[in-house]
Image: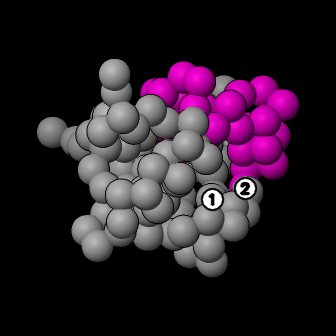
Amino acid sequence: GRYKSICRRGKDGTFNGSGGDESDLPLDREGRIVTIDCGGVVHKTFLKTLLRHPNTLLYEMAQPKGELYEDGAVFLDRDHGCFAHILNYYRTGRLAPPVGVPEDMWHVELVFFKIENPMYRV
């Protein structure tokens, strides 16, 4: 079987996970790979991955008229170590703080990205 995170690029720049021929590729923009440069470290993901958590900053950027939807790339002047964990949250649904990052710093990053911190739930 194929993994959902392994896809094939079509002539139109979109991707699919079927491994079929390129005529099967979606024409919508959600199949595109977008680039997020966070603190000088470049991350790439599918636009549709960022649509998994509504009301968050990356979700908003992935909407029509958002930077990632329109331009396909953005630079964020944030902590790249924290961002790797935030991006994994979009991919897996599991929010895990980076080892060695103080809780207050992690919380500031989550607030910036509009992600609810499970440690602060009432």
Q: Nearer the viewer, residue 96 or 42?
A: 96
Q: Which mark is residue 36?
A: 1
Q: Amino acid at mark 1?
A: Ile
Q: Quadrant of residue 38?
A: bottom right
Q: Residue visible at 70% across and 38% down?
A: 61
> Within 10 Å of the Cα at label 2, are there few (<14), some (14-19), or many (20+) other Cα atoms?
some
Of the residues shown, which amino acid type is indicated by label 2? Ala
Count numbered badges in the picture.
Answer: 2
Left or right of residue 52, residue 101 in this image: left
Residue 101 horizontal/vertical position (percent): 35, 68
**Does residue 53 lie above or below 98 as drawn?**
above
User: Residue 20 sits in which quadrant?
Assistant: top left
The outermost residue toward the left is: 1
Evaluate if marks 2 and 1 touch, with contact meaning CB atoms under 8 Å apart.
yes
Q: Can the viewer see residue 87 in this picture?
A: no
Residue 71 on the magenta segment: yes
Is 95 part of what is drawn in magenta? no
From which residue to which does the magenta span run? 45-73
Residue at which label 2 appears: 73
Picture disc at residue 44: none
For residue 43, above or below residue 96: below
> On the rendered structure, is 83 left or right of 68?
left
Dot 2 lies on which element?
strand
Asked whether 108 or 18 is in front, the reply is 108
- Rounded to the nearest angstrom, the CA distance separating label 2 from label 1 is 6 Å
The residue depicted at 54 percent of the width and 28 percent of the height is: 51
Picture quarter with the C terminus: top left
Residue 77 picture location, percent across and down: 69, 67
